[in-house]
Amino acid sequence: MDRESYQLVKEEIKRSADIVDLVGNFVQLRKAGRNYVGLCPFHSEKEPSFTVNRERQMFHCFGCKKGGDIFAFWMAYHHCSFPEAVKDLAERYHVPLPEKPLSAEEKRKRALREAILAVNEKAARYFHGNLMDSPGAEGARNYLHNRGIPVEVIRQFKLGYAFDQWEGLVGYLERGKVDRKIAESAGLIILGKKGRYYDRFRGRVIFPIFDLSGRVVGFGGRVLDEGHPKYLNTPETQVFQKGSVLYGLNASYPEIRKTRKALIVEGYMDFLALWIAGIRNIGATLGTALTPSHVRRLKGYASEIVLVFDSDEAGREAALRGLPVFLNEGVQGKAVLLPPGHDPDTFVKAEGPERFLELVEGAPSLLDFYMNQRLSDNRATVEEKVSVLKELLPCLYEVKDPTLRAGYVRRVSEAVGIKESVVWEELDRFRKKDGGQIQGRLRNKASEESAAKRYNRDLHILNLLIHHPETRAQLAECEWQPLLTDATIGTVIEAFLDKYKREGQFEPQDLVEELEDERARNEYREALLLPSFYSASSARVAVEEIKNKIREIKITSSIRDARRRGDMEELNALLKLRAKLHQGLMQ
Ligand SMILES: [Zn+2]
């Protein structure tokens, strides 16, 4: 397709489409004045800065600065090229498309994707046909019947059966003249050592896995008996990434959107059991923990995600791993642990769906869930509390929003009974020691830097100065310089206190234009936009802690001096003083 015809198609799509309606299919939008706003699908946020404007048919995110027209949205949201976006949208709005928009490589990839989807479709039909009609699938039918899965649900989710044979599907595809290479790329068949293909799924109930438009992207298979592995999935293919698909979402997302809440279970059977019990705002991970990609996918529909666990060990681990994911995506994460011996399936059967929903209603936040699990009785020793704190440090470290982090630090400090200032210090130590490794895992360089920067004490001092004028006099008297880790914020604090000493109390925004360094101005402007990290009383405590910290730094340097001079008397006195100061830090 040449440039000109592209332009024509583009224009026609633009005339047929409305950006608010289109984006509204993927992002929960609400009207705000002349705009529509929602949580940005392209970066982590908890307050909507993603804005869509109908008049101009454009979107813009004030957070990550992504923006543009419907094509820009489609490309960014679906990670596709411009020609693919044009093709998808042309299809969606029934705009006829002239031929040949793709490069040879793009065409090859697209053709392979389409071919895989087509063979998946065929395989799904084959498996489903086996289950419905074949005498050889009697066992599978009994199994599903005994698990309480009615035939309508089998039909709706196109459940199937793979015979316990090596060449069941291989033979079927051969008769259908399907290219075996494609079926291999789809992960359905495997090339054996002797150059013969055989079926991946054998003797299993088959759960086709659909994307949101209802195409089969992969399969899960479950054994009927106690065989191993209990569940088998399609391997990663061009169309199937285990870490970003949720089973059942194609059927359940309208309900998730309606309730703004998603319940996440661990497997196909759990999903179906809840579905049958009438609980429909659900999705199942495919034997993995919930990933950031899952959460991003869901956050367009849900503001709250409840993880349902059936064993405390796995639940505890998943909660710990899930914590930073949720915190950073701005989605409320909660967790429910079912009573011992139960999974969602057995639980709704034994206790009923109402009882299940009660558990979900009362679900604690992931952080509370985790801490409750680890510190379940009040007899946790100091060592246990310290070890819980250590486990939580990487999570706290990964929380990018400074206000959120401050809130969580406080929450953790309360729960483990260790002073907030000590938690901050541990966090700082963690950053210096292990932060480097964690940073490598963070996706985006800019957010790493701000994450590392933001919990420095510098920003907290600045936050106190901005929001708590009553602390200014005391902080002006402090020798806070040794506490600084960031030179830019240091200049800001210095300028702030200079102005204060010169003029007395002033409105913080008046300082902006007086800052000469542009970086300092930017930092300060951002600091002004942050809410207070402290209540009035915790601000008082924070100032005391800052003073203590300075005292400690001074004592430590005097200790070094005394040691060098060999003044034992002085040294002992100083060491005692420091120990006292330290004791004061533990509650
Ligand atoms: Zn954004």
Image (cartoon, rainbow, N blue to C red):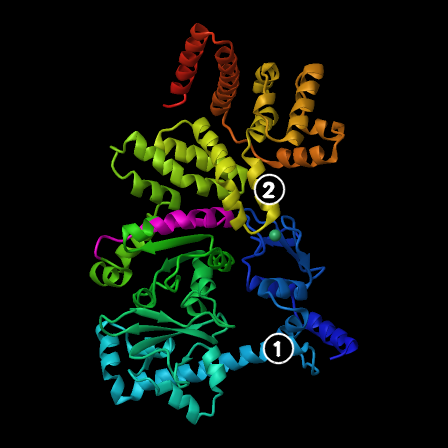
User: Residue at point 54% right, 48% down?
Assistant: 440
Q: Amino acid at mark 2?
A: Glu
Q: Earlier in the sequence, mark 1 or mark 2?
A: 1
Determine whether, in the image, residue 56 is placed left or right of residue 582: right
Q: Is label 2 in a helix, a strand or a loop?
A: helix
Point out the image quarter for the N terminus. Answer: bottom right
The answer to whether residue 134 is seen in the rendering is yes
Q: Quadrant of residue 464?
A: top right
| Magenta part of the chain | 317-341
Contact (Cβ within 8 Å) of mark 1 with mark 2? no
Tell which of 562 and 115 is nearer to you.
Answer: 562
Q: Is residue 244 magenta?
A: no
Q: Residue furthest bottom?
A: 175
Residue at x 46%, y 80% (from the top left corner): 184
Q: Amino acid at mark 1?
A: Glu
Q: Position of residue 87 (x, y in %)?
A: 64, 75
Position of 241 with respect to 319 (left or right) is right
Q: Residue at x 72, y 59 (%)?
A: 56
Q: Is residue 327 magenta?
A: yes
Residue hosting label 2: 449
- Judge whether 44 appears above or below 575 on screen: below
Where is mark 1, residue-wise?
A: 91
Up the image or down, 216 lies above or below 38; here it is: below
